[in-house]
Image: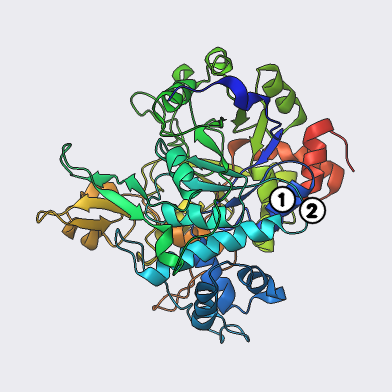
């Protein structure tokens, strides 16, 4: 789709706080960044799980229920509270009540939980100020995305960011959701013939019980990609307006795009990236839309470098993940900051850990034994299912499998045994990172598996200024001019 350069004239933020993990980029973090005049971003990943479990833990401070009271479809808010809220929290040594896993035909109450969970996170992030708030999604996590987008738009999200794939259809979906119109999205179904298309549908009008309200604001859309060539393709083939790009390099935490060409590993077993994985700044500058650089840019000099290359600014994640307002547990933050100050932090780019097949960065926290080895001892169970792959069964129906589930189950669904080697349950691990781990039926509490960017060690400059604890505001002042508050 051809675009004019008018979008670049709009005043966009210089700093985008990355949308990280499950609940790491919390509403508290996003609100703090937005109040400081930049783009605070909440993570849209698994928000139904986050809301469900926080309600069961008693909703400390009443923040969730305060936001739910503003949800425009009152019935959904009331039913969600009745179903999951426990005023006294969970009794000791009890599991969280579980949500069903997403399917092409997900249960209605799961879709409604998705709507209100995304609304709540954005509404809380926007509360009490006039700053900009965005929400981040993963294209690979397709099944929740349509309802998630609509819930965030009901709360007035200013930006939608999406990576981990090529989100070509999302701009047009945003256009239609702004008018409460039905939307659909092409699903990735392994083994499906090229002449058969599978679609996920969502009709907002089904949930209103009558006529939908006035049109919503259509948020700006930023695609998170790894190369200028993908930006060019998105502008040509997207179903609606792409308002900008975040160009994320392989130094970033979480999932990384695989190297171009044949996979090669270094002596540590990490993917090797080369010249072909670099960024063509000249091509980006010709596109007429703003772009931000991400992955190793959490330093004042790197911000200046990005601006010199024609970027609108930078997106940074890991530096915010370790600040006071992030959703990571205090113990995880403290341990990582100690390692950074001692120059002992080790981040391993694991080519196998993620069920998606994308390289995934893992922080080594525990002495000489890597977190990957520790996590390998976990009994395999797949009970959240966000990273499940859709595949075509012999009878033509759609099935669901994950390389991180029990190996026998995966093979029984037609999966290859070799695909399971080294795979981890990131869904449960990322929930544990923010203090909502599930107690499984064997009595084990799910363990965290932390991800951060390669260059998070450069935080030491900030820590020397602020000590082993700092705020989101400290990060912004540091990045903008290198001076402490």
Element class at badge 2: loop
Left or right: where does residue 311 sit relative to residue 144? Answer: right
Q: Is residue 457 visible?
A: yes
Image quadrant occupied by the C terminus: top right
**278 relative to 484, above or below:** above
**55 relative to 478, above or below:** below
Left or right: where does residue 270 sit relative to residue 305? Answer: left
Which quadrant of the structure image shows residue 282? top right
* x, y percent for residue 289: 58, 24
Q: Nearer the viewer, mark 2 or mark 1?
A: 2
Q: Could you classify mark 2 by the number of other residues whose Cα lies within 10 Å: few (under 14), some (14-19), or many (20 or more)?
A: some
Element class at badge 1: helix
**213 relative to 64, above or below:** above
Q: Could you classify mark 1 by the number of other residues whose Cα lies within 10 Å: few (under 14), some (14-19), or many (20 or more)?
A: many
* x, y percent for residue 300: 77, 30
Left or right: where does residue 262 sit relative to residue 63? Answer: left
Q: Earlier in the sequence, mark 2 or mark 1?
A: 1
Instruction: Kindly check if marks 2 and 1 are in contact, taking CB atoms under 8 A apart as contact.
Output: yes
Q: Is residue 328 visible?
A: no
Q: Which mark is residue 337?
A: 1
Q: Residue furthest right?
A: 485
Which quadrant of the structure image shows residue 195? top left
Residue under the image location 50 percent in, 41 percent down: 162
Residue under the image location 82 percent in, 39 percent down: 477
Q: Which mark is residue 384?
A: none
Image color mode: rainbow
Image quadrant occupied by the N terminus: top left
* x, y percent for residue 169: 39, 39
Decide which of 57, 198 is in the foreground and name it.
198
Q: Which residue is mark 2?
A: 469
Q: How far apart are the two marked residues, 2 and 1, measured between alpha carbons? A: 8 Å
Decide which of 75, 273 is in the foreground and name it.
75
């Amino acid at each position: 789709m051809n675009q004019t350069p008018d979008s670049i004239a709009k005043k966009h933020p210089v700093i985008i706080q990355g949308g990280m993990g499950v609940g790491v980029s919390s509403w508290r973090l996003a609100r703090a960044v937005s109040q400081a005049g930049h783009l605070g971003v909440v993570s849209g990943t698994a928000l139904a799980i986050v809301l469900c479990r926080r309600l069961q833990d008693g909703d400390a401070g009443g923040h969730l229920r305060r936001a739910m009271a503003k949800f425009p479809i009152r019935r959904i808010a009331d039913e969600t509270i009745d179903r999951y809220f426990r005023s006294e929290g969970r009794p000791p040594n009890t599991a969280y009540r579980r949500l069903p896993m997403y399917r092409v035909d997900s249960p209605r109450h799961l879709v409604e939980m998705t709507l209100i969970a995304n609304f709540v996170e954005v509404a809380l992030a926007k509360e009490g100020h006039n700053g900009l708030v965005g929400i981040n999604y993963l294209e690979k996590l397709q099944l929740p995305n349509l309802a998630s987008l609509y819930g965030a738009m009901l709360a007035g999200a200013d930006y939608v960011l999406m990576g981990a794939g090529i989100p070509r259809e999302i701009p047009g979906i945003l256009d239609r959701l702004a008018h409460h119109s039905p939307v659909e999205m092409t699903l990735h179904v392994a083994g499906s013939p090229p002449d058969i298309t599978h679609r996920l549908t969502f009709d907002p009008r089904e949930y209103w019980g009558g006529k939908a309200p006035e049109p919503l604001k259509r948020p700006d859309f930023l695609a998170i990609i790894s190369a200028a060539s993908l930006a060019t393709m998105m502008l040509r083939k997207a179903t609606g307006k792409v308002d900008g790009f975040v160009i994320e390099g392989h130094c970033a935490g979480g999932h990384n795009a695989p190297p171009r060409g044949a996979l090669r590993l270094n002596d540590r077993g990490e993917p090797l990236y080369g010249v072909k994985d670099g960024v063509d700044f000249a091509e980006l500058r010709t596109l007429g839309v703003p772009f931000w650089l991400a992955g190793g840019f959490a330093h004042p000099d790197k911000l200046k470098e990005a601006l010199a290359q024609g970027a609108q600014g930078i997106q940074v994640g890991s530096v915010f993940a370790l600040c006071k307002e992030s959703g990571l547990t205090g113990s995880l933050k403290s341990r990582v900051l100690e390692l950074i100050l001692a120059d002992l932090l080790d981040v391993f780019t694991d080519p196998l850990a993620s069920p998606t097949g994308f390289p995934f960065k893992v922080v080594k926290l525990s002495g000489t034994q890597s977190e990957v080895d520790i996590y390998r001892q976990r009994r395999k169970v797949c009970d959240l299912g966000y990273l499940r792959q859709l595949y075509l069964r012999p009878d033509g129906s759609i099935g669901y499998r994950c390389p991180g589930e029990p190996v026998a189950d995966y093979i029984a669904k037609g999966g290859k045994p070799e695909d399971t080697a080294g795979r981890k349950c990131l869904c449960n691990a990322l929930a544990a990172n923010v203090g909502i781990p599930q107690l499984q039926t064997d009595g084990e509490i799910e363990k965290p598996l932390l991800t951060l960017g390669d260059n998070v060690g450069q935080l030491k400059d900030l820590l020397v200024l602020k000590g082993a604890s700092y705020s989101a505001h400290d990060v912004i002042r540091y990045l903008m001019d290198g001076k402490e508050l």
